[in-house]
Image (cartoon, rainbow, N blue to C red):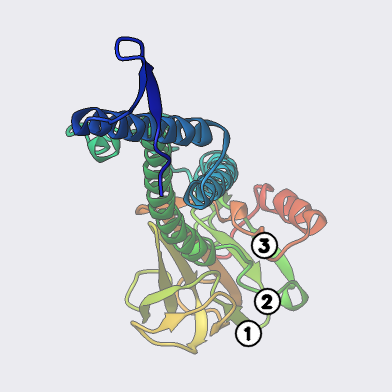
Amino acid sequence: MSKVKFYYDSDTLSYRKITRKKRRTFKYILAFLLATALFGLLFVFIGSQFFESPNEKALKRELSNMQFQFDLLNKKINEAETVLANIEDRDNNIYRLYFESNPIPEEQRKAGFGGVNRYKVFEGFDNSKLIKESNKRIDILQKRIVVQSKSLDEIAVLAEEKEKLLASIPAIQPVNNENLTRMASGYGMRTDPFNKTRKMHWGMDFTAPRGTPIYAVGDGVVERADSNSSGYGKHIRINHGYGYVSLYAHLYKYKIGKNQKVKRGDLIGFVGSTGRSEAPHLHYEIFKDGKRINPINFYYGSLTAEEYSKLLDRSSIENQSLD
């Protein structure tokens, strides 16, 4: 029960009971509620400035983790760019140089993407610039990888062609040294054995006993294995591709036939003295793009430096040929 309060009325010289009007009571209550609400808001504001809610703490941890992951991503991009730059450098300055292919220009490898704004979706965020730049780096990195992948595909084709070329070029002596009697005559002006006049000798004559094995000097396809060419007697022509053809003349007999594929070192026939020949020997010629060239330049695959030097000396002597 609330206490009853009195006040002294000087006019009547008596005590009177204090009565509170309802309107004033309502004002007091309203003022109290407003004051309480303002104090509560002030408390919440101060609390929010100095204290974190569980949800804020969780969001802060998530943001920190995202920043950590972003730093890791940038580090990986940097490492990938370094490794790819090394591969690109080797591609341009070793692989493509070796296979005589033009290097890929730097601006082609690292070109960006023009036209529409492909990064517009990342605008409007606090870190928009950072996000756009990272995505741009990744896009360029992906493009560089595609360019390098296509380049390596091209290098693989060039390597395969180079391997075929190296296997096809005439590169060995058609008769083994242990089977040779001597290197009778080389490429150049020589004395004809029949009319004793000086004339061009278009190949090299290897003297060897009848039946001595003759070997293919490079991979290729047999174009001819017949005696239908004047002066050569039984002879073989092998097309090695890339403009190279080798000819083996005055054979005793064949070991292969027309259109047959051969590998370097395959047995193709035997030394004889058929056709316009003075004694058993192999007359050997090389054609490049339809023109006869000196075979002395094509023995790097079977002779040592010393053996090649001796062969070079003997082939340069202007003696009498055997055909």
Q: Residues within 10 Å of mark 2 (few under 14, many from 20)?
A: many
Q: Residues within 10 Å of mark 1 (few under 14, many from 20)?
A: some
* Residue 293 x %, y %: 48, 50
> Of the residues shown, which amino acid type is indicated by label 3?
Ala
Disc marking residue 257 = none
> Of the residues shown, which amino acid type is indicated by label 1?
Arg
In the displayed structure image, the side of residue 303 where residue 283 appears, left or right: left
Q: Residues within 10 Å of mark 3 (few under 14, many from 20)?
A: many
* Residue 290 x %, y %: 35, 54
Instruction: Look at the picture and state if 131 lies above or below 13.
Output: below
Disc marking residue 210 = 1
Dot 1 and dot 3 residues touching (CB under 8 Å): no
What residue is rendered at 24% in x and 27% in y? 24
Query: Gap in Å between the C-alphas at discs 1 and 2?
Result: 7 Å
> Of the residues shown, which amino acid type is indicated by label 2?
Ala
Which one is earlier in the sequence, the residue at label 2 or at label 3?
A: 3
* Residue 282 x %, y %: 57, 72
Disc marking residue 208 = 2
Residue 279 visible somewhere in the drawing:
no
**Mark 2 falls on what kind of element?**
loop
Depth order, front residue of 81/167: 81
Q: Residue furthest top?
A: 11
Disc marking residue 184 = 3
In this rendering, the count of numbered labels is 3
